[in-house]
Image (spheres, helix red, strand yellow):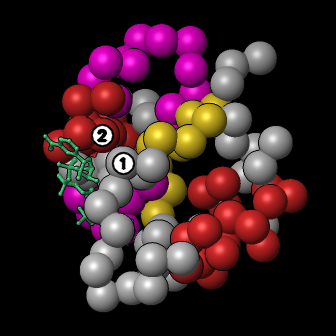
Amino acid sequence: MSRTVLITGATGSVSSALLDALDGSALNLRALVRDRARAGALERRGIEVVTGDLGDPGTLPHAFKEVDDLWLLTAMDPRRPPRRFADFARDHRAAFR
Ligand SMILES: NC(=O)c1ccc[n+]([C@@H]2O[C@H](COP(=O)([O-])OP(=O)(O)OC[C@H]3O[C@@H](n4cnc5c(N)ncnc54)[C@H](OP(=O)(O)O)[C@@H]3O)[C@@H](O)[C@H]2O)c1
């Protein structure tokens, strides 16, 4: 069974290059974006797109469902307390396997 890989910041520079590099691999690529309207090109490539905001943990559980690997390629939002995402990961660790 293919590994599911969640790639954050999927509309950004580094993640776009990573998605290009992994295109055609056996991995199940899942891209996290804040604005689905900007993810049309990813969807047309057959990449699974999920919406969520790393500064808003309530928007994230579906994105992390049955994820095997995480590429966290998003600059932390300086307006947010830096531990919020870490708190989310701790509180929802059952969603990780
Ligand atoms: N670019 C480089 O050459 C380079 C080199 C070394 C290290 N890095 C590091 O790699 C990381 C990514 O850099 P990048 O150049 O790819 O940045 P980027 O082009 O500015 O992309 C940042 C991505 O993060 C998303 N994002 C920002 N805040 C978010 C949030 N709260 N929730 C979910 N997504 C959020 C943005 O989404 P929106 O499109 O919705 O804004 C965008 O897709 C950074 O940590 C950077 O320091 C970059």
Asked where in the image residue 60 lies, by quadrant, the reply is bottom right
Residue at point 56%, 20% (across, down): 27
Examine the structure image and report whether residue 28 is included in the region drawn in magenta: yes
Q: Do the residues labelled 1 and 2 touch (CB within 8 Å)?
A: yes
Q: In which quarter of the image is the C terminus?
A: top right
Viewer-closest of 79 and 32: 79
Q: Residue 73 carries which label?
A: 1
Q: Write the start and end of the magenta stretch as one range.
A: 19-39
Horizontally, residue 14 falls left or right of residue 68, namely left
Q: Where is residue 30 in the image (x, y as percent from the top left)?
A: 51, 41
In this view, the residue farthest toward the left is: 13
Residue at point 67%, 25% (across, down): 3
Does any atom of ligand 1 lie closer than 8 Å to the CB of label 2?
Answer: yes
Asked where in the image residue 61 lies, by quadrant, the reply is bottom right
Residue at point 68%, 42% (across, down): 67
Asked where in the image residue 64 lies, by quadrant, the reply is bottom right
> Is residue 51 something one can see in this rendering?
yes
Viewer-closest of 14 and 65: 14
